[in-house]
Image (cartoon, rainbow, N blue to C red):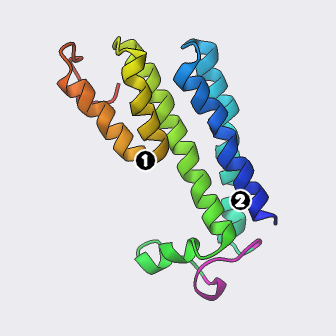
Amino acid sequence: MQWETIFSIANTWPLLFWLLLAVGPRTDLTARLVLFGGIFPLAITYAVLLPMIMTGMIDPVGPEGGSMDFTKLSGVMGLFDSKGGATVGWIHYLAFDLFVGLWVARNADRHAIARWVQFPILFFVLMAGPFGLMLYLLLRFTSKNKPQNATTPS
């Protein structure tokens, strides 16, 4: 497989939808575009490639192309020892970070958090997923107008 090409497309494609989240109108159509145009293709790519990698059909991973043991650090590291494994792992991150970005944007709009405040948080969700999510949840928890369930994603 052409892992560099797959990686490049998968890495670039979501940027369009991040831009849409950051500066586009917050409508149901925008949310559907991000979900079905950005997240869904990444999820499908991941769902197709992961079993093929894990069964050794393409780019066998692990120690000597052996089986994966996700209960040990060495087993997880084995997945990333191949171009295919690293690409599939990266697609996993891209899909989940974009999903979290969509949730943050919609939730922030629902709680009347200004877009200029959302923008840096969305940047951190894009660049360092869990850190950006933590920033958003802290913002909700410390906000003057904090929702009743500020510590629970809603």
Provide the residue span drawn in magenta. 57-66
> Which amino acid does the dot numbered 1 rest on?
Ala
Q: What is the magenta segment's predominant secondary structure?
A: loop
Does residue 81 appear in the picture of this structure?
Answer: yes
Please give the name of the residue rendered at 59% of the width and 76% of the height, measured from the top-left corner: 81
Mark seen at residue 49: 2
Of residues 65 and 25, the one drawn nearer to the viewer in this rendering: 25
Dot 1: few (<14), some (14–19), or many (≥20) neighbours within 10 Å? few
Q: Quadrant of the C terminus?
A: top left
Please give the name of the residue rendered at 65% of the width and 70% of the height, measured from the top-left corner: 54
Does residue 48 appear in the picture of this structure?
Answer: no
Dot 2: few (<14), some (14–19), or many (≥20) neighbours within 10 Å? some
Q: Is residue 63 magenta?
A: yes
Q: Which residue is mark 1?
A: 128
Which quadrant of the structure image shows residue 117? top left
| Residue 62 percent across, percent down from the top left | 59, 80
Give the residue furthest to the right: 1
Seen in the picture, residue 36 relative to 147 is either above or below; the reply is: below
Q: Quadrant of the N terminus?
A: bottom right
| Residue 9 percent across, percent down from the top left | 74, 48
Q: From the viewer's perspective, is 74 left or right of 151?
A: right
Please give the name of the residue rendered at 26% of the width and 27% of the height, measured from the top-left corner: 139
Mark seen at residue 21: none
Is label 1 in contact with label 2 (beta carbons under 8 Å)?
A: no
